[in-house]
Image (spheres, rainbow, N blue to C red):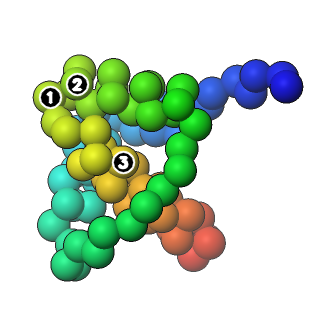
Amino acid sequence: MAKMKYRDPYEHMSDEEFEHDFFAALDRDRLKPVSLRLPESVLARTRVVAEARGIPYQVLIKALIESGLNQLERASDR
């Protein structure tokens, strides 16, 4: 299987914009537990990034999902 090149969906954002989206995602709705299967490599990368930012990896996953959804919604509004 060919390895896909990772493209950072947030590379166009400044650190301030990313953090704004990140923390805004944490301040929403009640939480519902879910089970999610991820490739080990994705989970490992997520843990590395979360550790570098000083946050739990689950929090990073939630923020990335929320931020990605916000971007998709903004793109569809155009």
Of the residues under marks 3 and 2, which one precedes in the sequence? Answer: 2
Q: Compared to 45, does 27 lie above or below?
A: below
Residue at left 61%, top 30%? 7
Q: Amino acid at mark 1?
A: Gly
Q: Position of residue 10 (x, y in %)?
A: 46, 38
Q: Nearer the viewer, residue 55 or 33?
A: 33
**What residue is shown with label 3?**
61
Provide the secondary structure element on which disc 1 rests: loop
Q: Amino acid at mark 3?
A: Ile
Whether residues under marks 3 and 2 lie with C-beta atoms below 8 angstroms apart, the answer is no
Give the total number of marks visible in the rendering.
3
* Residue 37 falls left or right of residue 64: right
Q: Position of residue 37 (x, y in %)?
A: 53, 50
Q: Position of residue 60 (x, y in %)?
A: 30, 44
Q: Amino acid at mark 2?
A: Glu
**What residue is shown with label 2?**
51
* Residue 51 falls left or right of residue 1: left
Provide the secondary structure element on which disc 3 rests: helix
* Spatial CA span between label 3 and label 2: 12 Å
Whether residues under marks 1 and 2 lie with C-beta atoms below 8 angstroms apart, the answer is yes
Provide the secondary structure element on which disc 2 rests: helix
**What residue is shown with label 1?**
54
Q: Compared to 14, does 76 lie above or below?
A: below
Viewer can see residue 17: no
Mark 1 is surrounded, within 10 Å at the Cα level, by few (under 14), some (14 to 19) or many (20 or more) other residues, namely: few
Circle on res. 32: none
